[in-house]
Amino acid sequence: MKSVKQLDYFKNIKQVREFEFGVFYFFEGLVISEIKEGVLFRWKMADRAVKAAQEVMGEDKPIAYISNRVNSYFVVPTDWIKFYKNRHQLHFYSVVGSTRGSFVSIILERMFFRNSIRKFTNLEEAVNWSVTKINSEAESV
């Protein structure tokens, strides 16, 4: 699987934020995460990433989020409830992964995420889909 840094699209990077639990790449309207191996990704971690996204991207633009699962880690699906209680909104959410485990966790996440989650095995396809969605959303506003 490709890392974000290996994409041609990387030339459009606005900012990179590194945390002890993973790296977040910020583009115009798009955030891509690469969480570190073995992490139990919880609300407190997500909240730090959300605050970073608000600093970099603002709070009122549509955002697409790609979870690039180059490493094996776990998400606490019930923490999506906290995400919404704090009034955070993702317009588009996709997961890139090639392991069976990465897609099993999507099933759990779908139970708590209000919008649909798109799954991909190719990061470039996920970026193209996300950018198209964000651009069409911006045009309709």
Image (cartoon, rainbow, N blue to C red):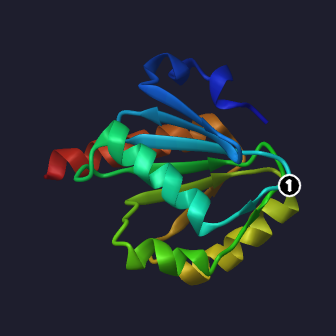
Relative to 64, does residue 43 appear above or below in the rendering? below
Q: Is residue 25 visible?
A: yes
Number of on-image labels: 1
Query: Which residue is at 77% across, 45% downward?
Result: 36
Using the rendered view, name the quadrant where residue 45 is placed.
Answer: bottom right
Can you say which quadrant of the picture contains the N terminus?
A: top right
Say which of 108 and 38 sits in front: 38
- Answer left or right for 127 relative to 27: right
Hey, which quadrant is residue 90 in on the image? bottom left
Q: Position of residue 139 (x, y in %)?
A: 18, 45
Q: Label 1 amino acid?
A: Gly
Local crowd size for mark 1, using a 10 Å CA cut-off: few (<14), some (14–19), many (≥20): few
Residue that mark 1 sits on: 38
Residue plotted at (13% across, 52% down): 141
User: With respect to residue 28, does 140 lie above or below?
Assistant: below
Q: Is residue 113 visible?
A: no
Please provide percent x and percent y for residue 131. Answer: 41, 39
Residue in the picture at 73% in, 48% down: 69
Residue 84: image location, x then y, percent: 41, 76
For the residue labelled by badge 1, is the local secondary structure a helix, a strand or a loop?
Answer: loop
Q: Position of residue 8 (x, y in %)?
A: 57, 18
As displayed, is residue 96 above or below residue 18? below
> Looking at the image, which is closer to me, 82 or 25?
82
